[in-house]
Image (tube, helix red, strand yellow):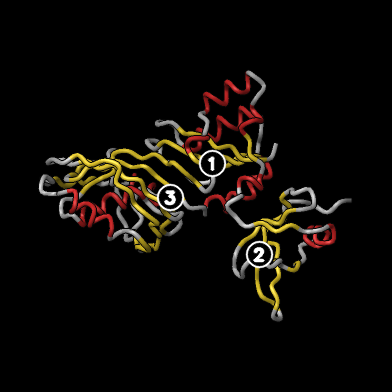
Amino acid sequence: MDGVVNVCKTGGPTSHDVVDDVRRLFAQRRVGHAGTLDPMATGVLVICLGKATRIVEYLVGMPKEYRARMVLGVSTDTQDSTGVVISEKDASYVTEDDFKRAIKSFVGEIEQIPPMTSAIKHQGKALYKLAREGKVVERAPRKVTIYGIDILDIIPGSRAEAEILVRCSSGTYIRTLCSDIGNALGCGGHMSMLERTRVGMFDIERSVTVDQLRQAKLEGRLDDHVYDMSNALKNMPAMMIDSEGERRIMHGLPIDADNKVTCGVTVRILGTGEDLLALGVVTEQNGRLIVKPRKVLIEPAG
């Protein structure tokens, strides 16, 4: 089976655990996820089956949305509630207006220093593995984009708490955002809860837990929860092609772009039956726009 499942991860299991569960349920060898969630985190974990594992990189790059709760006045070595407390400060002076001003300064393109708990590699070794060895290394800041932050709740006090909804680019560390907001307020802070509410077109309202998938399998409805590859990428512009275009795409050859797409964007290339044939990038060549296939998802006949 080829397609994408919008799984709602519960707290506790790793993302790899969820992949293993889905692999067994669908009796599918080729299974992968489009973006790790830490064990304590919950929410949308996009799982790809079969040929859909070839579009993982495009799903990983989709914008994300998170609901997070943060505690002000307490900083930890992991920037979340699982870590060791490294500093404490009374946060009762922080007002709602202070908090609003602080988060406003983080909207737009910002730089983040990846946490030592991340999977980013340093000299060939993942940071989280170095952290387990008690090592801390210098990390270069990375640019990410925060599209918006909404305040859902604020509870004032010496250990003030706030709940926020963050819309951001791929690669954003919410724990680091919470820590940085706390530092901007002068009291420090850490993330105490994280729920991913959206990845691209996949939202938490339409996600299913592993237990719900097990029940669906018993009822013979497992396929109902699988999105085809084109739908999974429906936030991406699409271009229909004819049979001659299909022939060229099958052999990795460029095709003319239509007037609905712009230079530099990645597009879905759909065949006469509206099946997803390939993903391509619009480029300019000799004064005209063409689409160069980047990921061909069908094979030439014969």
Inter-mark Cα distance, 3 to 2: 38 Å
Image vertical order of residue 181 relative to residue 281, above or below? above
Amino acid at circle 1? Val
**Residue 110 rendering spot, x and y as whole percentages:** 35, 62
Image vertical order of residue 247 relative to residue 199, above or below? below
Query: Would you call the spot at circle 2 few (<14 residues within 10 Å), some (14-19), or many (20 or more)?
Result: few
Q: Nearer the viewer, mark 3 or mark 2?
A: 2
Inter-mark Cα distance, 3 to 1: 18 Å
Q: Residue at x 39, y 37 (%)?
A: 41
Labelled disc at residue 260: 2
Amino acid at circle 2? Lys
Q: Residue at x 67, y 21 (%)?
A: 220
Seen from the viewer's position, the closer of residues 63 and 258 is: 258
Query: Would you call the spot at circle 3 few (<14 residues within 10 Å), some (14-19), or many (20 or more)?
Result: some
Q: Which residue is disc 1 drawn over?
A: 46
SS assignment at label 2: loop
Q: Residue at x 19, y 39 (%)?
A: 155
Label total for image? 3
- Which of the image's four quarters has the N terminus? top right
Q: Which residue is disc 3 drawn over?
A: 119
